[in-house]
Amino acid sequence: MATYKLNVNGKSYSVTASSADMPLLWVLRDKIGLTGTKYGCGIEVCGACTVLVDGQPEKSCDMSVQEAVGRKIVTVEGLAADTNGVKAQAAWVAKQVPQCGFCQSGMLVSATGAMKAGHHGSSIVPELNNLCVCGTYARIKDAAKTL
């Protein structure tokens, strides 16, 4: 077992993992206790596990803990400290986006990453390639267009 130093939501964490290949998702959820990032498919398709890594949306189910060392990671819990994240959350609430809410943490992180990349309004919509089983895409698009 090795110890890895991670920067998550602006805080430093030392985590012990059984393998350097342990997915970042499990480190965030099981080692650090940040359970807002969800496990969906495990193969980088659904986007429920999306986090920002150095400001860019990344699927944490397929990123190893070793790959995350030395990088700035932001989870859905960390969006409250980000102006773009706060805007995205407010838009989601105003447009009543979530039904079950399972995919929404990844959607919010993806929208925040798109704004950080300079996208606004309708140009955010193509950046939201996460899956929503409830099918709230119309509301997701409406919320994204307000950003």
Image: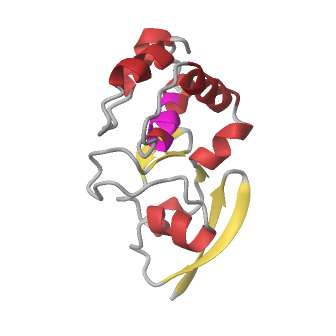
Q: Is residue 94 left or right of residue 64?
A: right
Please tell me whether residue 34 is drawn above or below residue 84 in the rendered image.
below
Q: Residue at x 41, y 67 (%)?
A: 23
Please tell me whether residue 107 is drawn above or below residue 92 in the rendered image.
below
Which residues are the magenta region? 105-111
Furthest residue toward front: 99
The picture places residue 103, in percent across and down from the top left corner, at: 41, 42
The picture places residue 41, in percent across and down from the top left corner, at: 28, 55
Q: Residue at x 26, y 46 (%)?
A: 45
Q: Residue at x 35, y 59 (%)?
A: 62
Q: How is the image coloured?
A: secondary structure
The picture places residue 20, in percent across and down from the top left corner, at: 44, 76
Which quadrant of the structure image shows residue 124? Answer: top left
The picture places residue 78, in percent across and down from the top left corner, at: 66, 46
Helix, strand or loop: magenta stretch? helix
Looking at the rendered image, the quarter that the C terminus falls into is: top right
Numbered label tally: 0
Relative depth, front residue between 3 and 83: 83
Relative depth, front residue between 5 and 35: 35
Q: Residue at x 26, y 55 (%)?
A: 43
Q: Is residue 106 left or right of residue 77?
A: left
Please tell me whether residue 105 is drawn above or below residue 127 in the rendered image.
below
Relative depth, front residue between 144 and 92: 92
* Residue 109 belongs to the span the image colors magenta: yes
Please tell me whether residue 7 is drawn above or below residue 96 in the rendered image.
below
Which quadrant of the structure image shows residue 31? Answer: bottom right
